[in-house]
Image (tube, rainbow, N blue to C red):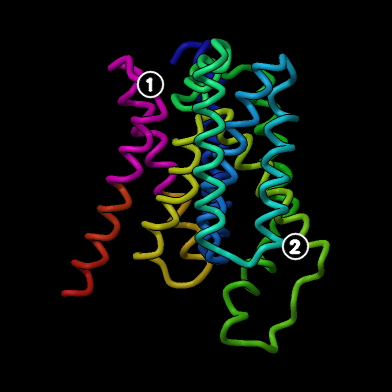
Amino acid sequence: MTDLLLTPFVAGFLITLVLALAGSGLFLRGSVWQALALGQWAAAGGVLASVLHWPVLPVALALGAGVMALLQRVRDTERLPLALFLGGLAAVTLLAANFSQASIAAAAWAEGQLYFAGPGELVAVVVAGVASAVLWPWLRRVWLHAQLAPDVSAAPAPPTVARWLETAWLVAVIVLGSMVLGMPAALATLLLPAWGAAFLARGLTGALLWTQSLAIAGFLVAWTISLPLDQPFAPVLVVVLLLLALLARAGAALRRTH
């Protein structure tokens, strides 16, 4: 691996770990639809920033935070997130159709810019990783309560500040992951390893370990395939993660038959 590719590789590997952790939390909360809406509006924010010549990350974070705030206020776990996802997709398409710079930015968010990730992206990913480690006790408490609450109503609820921190962390992780890997690849890293792990794991610890293992394997395989074949990284990663999730499901089914 050349020195030019070392920074993108490390940035991609680290954001994969953080996204996989967030994916586990989304599955425990039953909030996977939120990731679709949040990721799409983060992409819309990035495209809008290119048109206005504003910094990408603050605009994407602002739109992502607005979408998440709306989703937290309205108790609709499927229809509203899907509607917001379609609205964000329409916004990106309209911007790309009317502004040449937006068209380039939309393609970048779709295909991913991992090969061109620089020190700035690496620093942001490292900060996200450190924040994830620091916040882990509170994240774990929020996710366990979300998992237990339907059956154990007497379970102590996490403090409000923990819920807000978990929401802010989730927004930042999805936006940053979409910037580094591309929106489809970031959503695939969020959803597919956690989905595959659900067939194999028992308990929170097992789910986390299986999710991380599948995500890391997918990233390494996609990196190994896409570079020699001169392919865009994001779609290769989506295909690899989908295959790994299907293999996990098939392996779990085979194990039950024996």
Which residue range is magenta in the image? 214-243
Query: In the image, 150: left or right of 225?
Result: right
Q: Tell me the residue that label 1 is attached to.
A: 232
Task: Please give the name of the residue rendered at 49% of the width and 18% of the height, measured from the top-left corner.
Answer: 115
Q: Is residue 15 visible?
A: yes
Which labelled disc corresponds to residue 103?
none
Q: Residue at x 56, y 23 (%)?
A: 95
User: x and y percent of residue 25 in the render?
Assistant: 57, 59
| Residue position for label 2 | 163
Q: Residues within 10 Å of mark 1 (few under 14, many from 20)?
A: some
- Name the quadrant containing residue 135: bottom right
Q: Is residue 63 left or right of residue 9?
A: right
Tag 1 near tag 2, CB within 8 Å: no
As helix, strand or loop, the secondary structure at mark 1 comes to loop
- Residue at left offset 55%, top offset 45%: 19
First of labels 1, 2 by sequence position: 2
Q: The disc labelled 1 sits on which kind of residue? A: Pro
Magenta-span inclusion, residue 223: yes
Asked whether the viewer can see residue 113, the reply is no
Most common SS among magenta residues: helix
Residue 150, by quadrant, is bottom right
Q: Position of residue 193 (x, y in %)?
A: 42, 51
Quarter of the picture holding the N terminus? top left
Compared with 59, 147 (above or below) is: below
Q: Secondary structure at mark 2?
A: helix
